[in-house]
Image: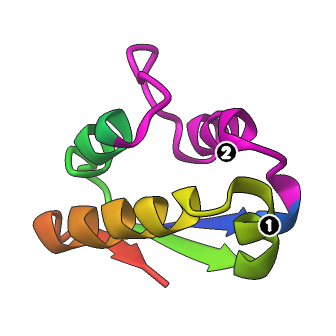
Amino acid sequence: MKKVILNGKNIADKASLHETLISLLDLPEWYGKNLDALHDCLTSIKDETEIQIINKDALEEAIGKYTFSLMKVLKESAEENPNLKII
């Protein structure tokens, strides 16, 4: 199982969030750096993957209400893809 840790302290804004996700999850070149594209990528994961979010308060400070939307996408993607687990 691939284990990924998304640390809110390492995120400065939406752009750095998406760059971090690209790096952590090895997202494809066509990834559009938005939540719709993230959903598409996460629901296509074939290998068991666990994403753990730490320092969520820092993430909320950096990207505000976008954090809620991100968490919703992560949850919905995990519900659709049995290979994905969100902690």
Q: Residue at x 36, y 76 (%)?
A: 85
Q: How many residues crowd around disc 2 within 10 Å: few (fewer than 14), some, or many (20 or more)? A: many
Q: Residue at x 46, y 15 (%)?
A: 29
Residue 10, image x and y in percent?
85, 56
Q: Amino acid at mark 1?
A: Glu
Secondary-structure class at tag 2: helix
Q: Is residue 24 magenta?
A: yes
For the N terminus, the quadrant is bottom left
Vertical arrangement, residue 62 with respect to residue 34, above or below: below
Q: Residue at x 37, y 65 (%)?
A: 74
- In the displayed image of the protein, which residue is found farthest to the left? 80
Q: In terms of sequence position, does the residue under pointer 2 or pointer 1 come before the other? A: 2
Q: Amino acid at mark 2?
A: Leu
- The stretch in magenta equals 10-35
Distance CA(mark 2)–CA(mark 1)? 13 Å
Residue 12, image x and y in percent?
84, 47
Rendered image: mark on residue 61: 1
Secondary-structure class at tag 1: helix
Q: Is residue 73 magenta?
A: no
Residue 34, image x and y in percent?
44, 34
Residue 61, image x and y in percent?
80, 66
Please give the residue where the numbered disc 2 appears in the rendered image: 17
Q: Can residue 63 be seen? A: yes
In this view of the protein, which residue sits in the foreground, 81 or 15?
15
- In the displayed image of the protein, which residue is found farthest to the bottom? 87
Quadrant of the rendered image containing residue 67:
bottom right
